[in-house]
Image: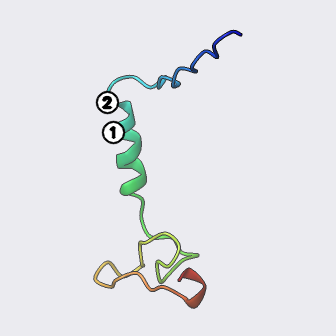
Amino acid sequence: MKQKEKKKHNQSTLAPGAANAVVQQIVNQPASPTDPTGSYTGRPENPNEAPVQDADDL
């Protein structure tokens, strides 16, 4: 029997440091007008408030 070859993990096609730039773009997004309490995005409109979880978020 032939031994199964292990699949290699896909290497990122991003240049070094590019992943960090992508992460920073995601993290620095402003609050969403369609999610004012931040229950989905984690970013409420008022930056001094904590995100609110609804019953369906539990």
Q: Please provide percent x and percent y for residue 19.
A: 39, 35
Q: How far, Cα to Cα, is label 1 from label 2?
A: 5 Å
Relative to 49, does residue 43 appear above or below in the rendering? above
Which color scheme did the rendering employ for the protein?
rainbow
Residue 5 vertical placement versus 44 (above, below): above
What is the crowding at mark 2: few (fewer than 14 residues within 10 Å), some, or many (at least 20)? few
Label 2 element class:
loop
Residue 31 percent location from the top left of the image: 44, 70
Residue closest to the far bottom: 55
Quadrant assignment for the N terminus: top right
Q: Position of residue 24 (x, y in %)?
A: 34, 48
The amino acid type found where label 1 is placed reads: Asn
In this rendering, position of residue 5 left or right of residue 20? right
* Residue at the limit of the structure toward the right, as seen here: 1
Tell me the amino acid under the disc marked 2. Answer: Gly
Residue 2 in the image, given as x and y percentages of width and height: 68, 9
Q: Quadrant of residue 44?
A: bottom left
Residue at point 48% right, 85% down? 53
**Residue topped by disc 2:** 17
Considering the numbered disc 1 on the image, is that residue within a helix, a strand or a loop?
helix
Judging depth in this view, the residue of 39 and 33 nearest the camera is 39
Residue at 54% over, 75% down: 33
Name the residue tied to disc 1.
20
Residue extending furthest left?
Answer: 48
Residue closer to the observer: 45 or 24: 24
Q: Are marks 1 and 2 in contact (CB under 8 Å)?
A: yes
Looking at this view, is 55 or 32 the one in front? Answer: 55
Residue at the (60%, 85%) spot, across then down: 56
Location of residue 48 by image quarter = bottom left
